Image (cartoon, rainbow, N blue to C red):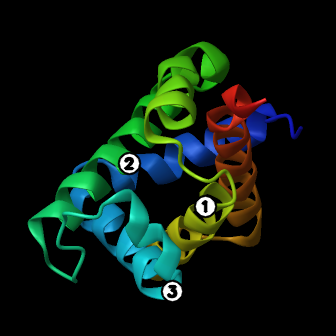
Amino acid sequence: MFKLSGEDKANVKAVWDHVKGHEDAFGHEALGRMFTGIEQTHTYFPDKDLNEGSFALHSHGKKVMGALSNAVAHIDDLEATLVKLSDKHAHDLMVDPAEFPRLAEDILVVLGFHLPAKFTYAVQCSIDKFLHVTMRLCISKYR
């Protein structure tokens, strides 16, 4: 598994300062991209309207990005921070672990699009590593 360096952590925190307050919008867009591009992801929300602009998409997007904001706030103890989320996704929701990296890619796209001046090569690599670590921890309970 990737390890986050001090520079990675600083880069993630610096970018996340610009995400704060926009979790709803960024999460909505990232999930919208995933739900549009990967049809089978709809199976986790059979009774929800997942169309662009829907309440369900905004609500869940805010939850996802809020969880990532919490992870950033506790970046030095990600494993303990994400244990409940991992349990929930593995045992209650039974989300296919293959969906997590796909969502991470969509989050990277959204952040790069909305924060182009902040998204240098080094920052992109740090965010990618952070998302990789968080996603791996979220699927760690599947074993």
User: In the rendering, at what x and y percent does residue 139 appear?
Assistant: 67, 38
User: In the rendering, at what x and y percent does residue 129 appear?
Assistant: 75, 50
State the residue at coordinates (41%, 86%): 36
Q: Which quadrant would residue 47 be assigned to in this image?
A: bottom left
Residue bearing the label numbered 2? 64
**If you read the primary sequence from the N terminus, does the residue marked by circle 3 or circle 2 appear first?**
3
Residue bearing the label numbered 3? 37
* Callout 2 amino acid: Val
**If you read the primary sequence from the N terminus, does the residue marked by circle 3 or circle 1 appear first?**
3
Quadrant of the rendering where the N terminus is positioned? top right
From this viewpoint, which residue is outermost toward the left?
A: 55
Foreground label between 3 and 2: 3
User: In the rendering, at what x and y percent does residue 96 appear?
Assistant: 61, 53
Q: In terms of secondary structure, where does tag 1 sit?
A: helix
Residue bearing the label numbered 1? 99
In the drawing, what numbered circle is on residue 3? none
User: In the rendering, at what x and y percent does residue 111 appear?
Assistant: 48, 69
Q: In terms of secondary structure, where does tag 2 sit?
A: helix
